[in-house]
Amino acid sequence: MKSRLAVADSVLTRRLAGLVESGLLEKKAYDDGGRARQEYVLTPKGADALPVLNAVVMWAEKHLPAPSDQAHMYVIHSGCGQRTSSADTCTGCGERLTAANTSWHSLTRTDAPVQLATAA
Ligand SMILES: [Zn+2]
Protein backbone atom coordinates (compact mmCIF):
# COMPACT_ATOMS: atom_id res chain seq x y z
CA MET A 1 0.00 0.00 0.00
CA LYS A 2 2.80 2.39 0.91
CA SER A 3 4.67 1.88 -2.35
CA ARG A 4 1.52 2.21 -4.46
CA LEU A 5 0.57 5.46 -2.77
CA ALA A 6 4.14 6.82 -2.59
CA VAL A 7 3.51 8.49 0.77
CA ALA A 8 5.53 8.74 3.97
CA ASP A 9 4.86 6.28 6.80
CA SER A 10 3.38 9.05 8.94
CA VAL A 11 0.94 10.06 6.19
CA LEU A 12 -0.17 6.47 5.59
CA THR A 13 -0.55 5.85 9.33
CA ARG A 14 -2.68 8.97 9.73
CA ARG A 15 -4.89 8.07 6.74
CA LEU A 16 -5.40 4.48 7.90
CA ALA A 17 -6.21 5.68 11.43
CA GLY A 18 -8.84 8.00 9.95
CA LEU A 19 -10.40 5.14 7.99
CA VAL A 20 -10.44 2.99 11.15
CA GLU A 21 -11.92 5.85 13.19
CA SER A 22 -14.61 6.32 10.52
CA GLY A 23 -15.52 2.63 10.73
CA LEU A 24 -14.54 1.84 7.12
CA LEU A 25 -11.56 -0.37 8.10
CA GLU A 26 -10.68 -2.38 11.16
CA LYS A 27 -7.37 -3.73 12.39
CA LYS A 28 -7.17 -7.48 12.86
CA ALA A 29 -4.33 -9.46 14.36
CA TYR A 30 -2.83 -12.36 12.40
CA ASP A 31 0.12 -14.69 12.87
CA ASP A 32 2.88 -14.27 10.29
CA GLY A 33 4.83 -17.45 11.03
CA GLY A 34 5.45 -16.64 14.66
CA ARG A 35 5.27 -12.88 14.46
CA ALA A 36 2.10 -11.20 15.63
CA ARG A 37 1.08 -8.67 13.00
CA GLN A 38 -1.95 -6.57 12.18
CA GLU A 39 -3.78 -6.10 8.92
CA TYR A 40 -6.47 -3.70 7.83
CA VAL A 41 -9.70 -5.22 6.60
CA LEU A 42 -12.87 -3.69 5.24
CA THR A 43 -15.82 -3.49 7.61
CA PRO A 44 -19.35 -4.00 6.29
CA LYS A 45 -19.65 -0.18 6.33
CA GLY A 46 -16.52 0.08 4.18
CA ALA A 47 -17.69 -2.63 1.79
CA ASP A 48 -21.03 -0.84 1.35
CA ALA A 49 -19.11 2.26 0.20
CA LEU A 50 -17.79 0.43 -2.90
CA PRO A 51 -20.60 1.45 -5.29
CA VAL A 52 -20.18 5.08 -4.19
CA LEU A 53 -16.41 4.97 -4.77
CA ASN A 54 -16.85 3.21 -8.12
CA ALA A 55 -19.33 5.91 -9.15
CA VAL A 56 -16.83 8.65 -8.22
CA VAL A 57 -14.13 6.94 -10.33
CA MET A 58 -16.52 6.68 -13.30
CA TRP A 59 -17.76 10.24 -12.88
CA ALA A 60 -14.18 11.58 -12.76
CA GLU A 61 -13.22 9.53 -15.82
CA LYS A 62 -16.17 11.01 -17.72
CA HIS A 63 -16.00 14.64 -16.61
CA LEU A 64 -12.44 15.49 -15.55
CA PRO A 65 -9.51 15.75 -17.96
CA ALA A 66 -6.85 13.08 -17.51
CA PRO A 67 -3.30 14.45 -17.19
CA SER A 68 -2.16 11.95 -19.84
CA ASP A 69 -3.51 9.13 -22.01
CA GLN A 70 -2.06 6.67 -19.48
CA ALA A 71 -3.80 8.29 -16.52
CA HIS A 72 -7.31 6.97 -17.11
CA MET A 73 -8.84 4.94 -14.28
CA TYR A 74 -11.09 1.98 -14.99
CA VAL A 75 -13.24 -0.21 -12.79
CA ILE A 76 -12.60 -3.86 -13.67
CA HIS A 77 -14.65 -6.90 -12.61
CA SER A 78 -11.96 -9.47 -11.92
CA GLY A 79 -14.48 -12.30 -12.24
CA CYS A 80 -14.74 -11.85 -16.02
CA GLY A 81 -11.91 -9.35 -16.55
CA GLN A 82 -14.17 -6.80 -18.22
CA ARG A 83 -14.26 -3.06 -17.63
CA THR A 84 -17.64 -2.08 -16.22
CA SER A 85 -19.62 1.12 -16.69
CA SER A 86 -21.96 0.44 -13.75
CA ALA A 87 -20.95 1.20 -10.16
CA ASP A 88 -22.60 -1.85 -8.59
CA THR A 89 -23.01 -4.51 -11.28
CA CYS A 90 -20.59 -5.74 -13.95
CA THR A 91 -21.88 -4.63 -17.34
CA GLY A 92 -19.90 -7.47 -18.94
CA CYS A 93 -21.47 -10.43 -17.11
CA GLY A 94 -24.10 -9.05 -14.73
CA GLU A 95 -22.42 -10.15 -11.49
CA ARG A 96 -22.72 -7.89 -8.43
CA LEU A 97 -19.49 -5.97 -7.75
CA THR A 98 -17.82 -6.45 -4.36
CA ALA A 99 -14.48 -5.34 -2.96
CA ALA A 100 -13.25 -8.94 -3.40
CA ASN A 101 -14.05 -9.08 -7.13
CA THR A 102 -13.38 -5.50 -8.20
CA SER A 103 -10.16 -3.78 -9.28
CA TRP A 104 -9.34 -0.25 -10.23
CA HIS A 105 -6.84 0.05 -13.01
CA SER A 106 -4.68 2.90 -14.24
CA LEU A 107 -1.71 2.29 -16.53
CA THR A 108 0.23 5.02 -14.72
CA ARG A 109 0.32 2.80 -11.63
CA THR A 110 0.67 -0.81 -12.80
CA ASP A 111 0.35 -2.97 -15.89
CA ALA A 112 -2.27 -5.14 -14.21
CA PRO A 113 -5.43 -4.23 -12.27
CA VAL A 114 -4.99 -3.89 -8.52
CA GLN A 115 -7.47 -5.87 -6.45
CA LEU A 116 -9.28 -3.67 -3.93
CA ALA A 117 -9.41 -6.39 -1.29
CA THR A 118 -8.61 -10.04 -0.96
CA ALA A 119 -11.42 -12.53 -0.64
CA ALA A 120 -12.11 -13.52 2.95
ZN1 LIG B 1 -18.05 -9.37 -15.16
Image (cartoon, rainbow, N blue to C red):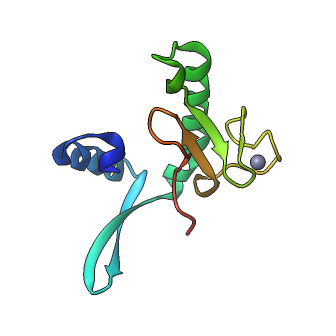
Q: Residue at x 58, y 13 (%)?
A: 63
* Residue positioned most to the bottom: 34
Task: Work out whether residue 106 or residue 59 is closer to the camera in this orientation and state it.
Answer: 106
Using the image, determine if residue 115 lies above or below residue 108.
below
Image position, residue 115 (x, y; %): 54, 52
Q: How many labels sit on residues?
A: 0
Q: Residue at x 44, y 38 (%)?
A: 109
Q: Residue visible at 51% across and 57% down?
A: 117
Q: At which x and y percent is residue 87?
A: 67, 36
Residue 24 placement, left or right of 98: left
Front-lying residue, 25 or 4: 4
Name above or below for residue 89 compared with residue 74: below
**Where is residue 106 drawn, in percent x and y?**
52, 34
Q: Quadrant of the C terminus?
A: bottom right
Q: Residue furthest left?
A: 10
Which residue appears farthest toward the right when viewing the image? 93
| Residue at the far front in the pictured view | 111
111 sits left or right of 2 in the view: right
Residue depicted at x 25% and y 81%: 35
Nearest to the observer: residue 13 or residue 52: 13
Residue 85 in which image quadrant: top right
